[in-house]
Amino acid sequence: MSDQIFVPADFVIADGLTAEEFRLEPLGPQHNAADYAAWTASISHIQATPGFAGRGWPHPMSLAENLRDLERHARDFADRRGFTYTVLSTGTGEVIGCVYIYPPRSDGEGSVSAGDHDAAVSSWVRADCAELDPVLYHTVRAWLERDWPFRSIEYAPRV
């Protein structure tokens, strides 16, 4: 990843978003056990989610490895290099998914070049919440287009 800051220095990063069925909050180490339980129960579902094919994640890892991953996401957020939000059910408060907002990758694996888009976004929901995937997609896409400083977003469409 580049050392360049992803968004302008004067842009105020949202500390979350609330919709009817879910709310987003910055992902951090405090979510480790719930995040781990959510994605490990839905590996094949996430791999089949638009935007995750051929990515190499999710893959089996330990709870300690997941914690390191969440710590990295929290550092990226604090350093304004990428923004990962956990998706929590408004009804139960359970972790039901995740949203990643990062600079575009140009890794030769089908990702677009950085010049084509300002941001690369991906999201997933647990298999038992699959009906929320298009709702999350449309809600997040509208939020990014309305409130974020991106001109063009790479985000695998949902129906």
Image (cartoon, helix red, strand yellow):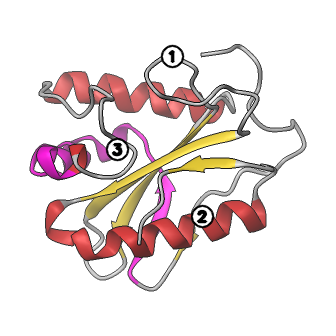
Q: Which mark is residue 141?
A: 2
C-beta proximity under 8 Å, tags 3 and 2: no
To which quarter of the image does residue 80 belong?
top right
Residue at figure coordinates x 51%, y 16% from the top left: 107
Q: CA distance from mark 3 to mark 2?
A: 26 Å
Crowding near the residue tagged with mark 2, few <14, some 14–19, many ≥20 C-alpha atoms within 10 Å: some
Looking at the image, do the residues carrying marks 1 and 2 touch, with CB atoms under 8 Å apart?
no
The residue identified by callout 1 is: 107
Which is more N-terminal, label 2 or label 3? 3
Q: Residue visible at 14% across and 25% down?
A: 61
Closest to the observer, 10 or 7:
7
What span is colored magenta in the figure?
Answer: 21-45
Total numbered labels: 3
Q: Residue 50: x percent and y percent? A: 36, 51
Relative placement, left or right, of 94 versus 30 is: left
Label 1 is placed on what type of residue? Answer: Asp
Chief secondary structure of the magenta span? Answer: helix
Drawn side of residue 89 relative to residue 155, left or right: left
Q: Quadrant of the N terminus?
A: top right
Image height check: is 2 above or below 37?
A: above
- Tell me the residue at 9%/50% (across/down): 41
Q: Nearer the viewer, residue 72 or 133?
A: 133
Amino acid at dot 3: Gln
Discs 1/3, front: 1
Q: Disc 3 or disc 2, which is closer to the eye? A: 2
Q: Which residue is mark 3?
A: 30
Number of residues whose C-alpha sits closer than 10 Å to that of mark 1, classed few (under 14), some (14–19) or many (20 or more): few
**Which residue shows up at 25% across the image and 29% down it?**
66
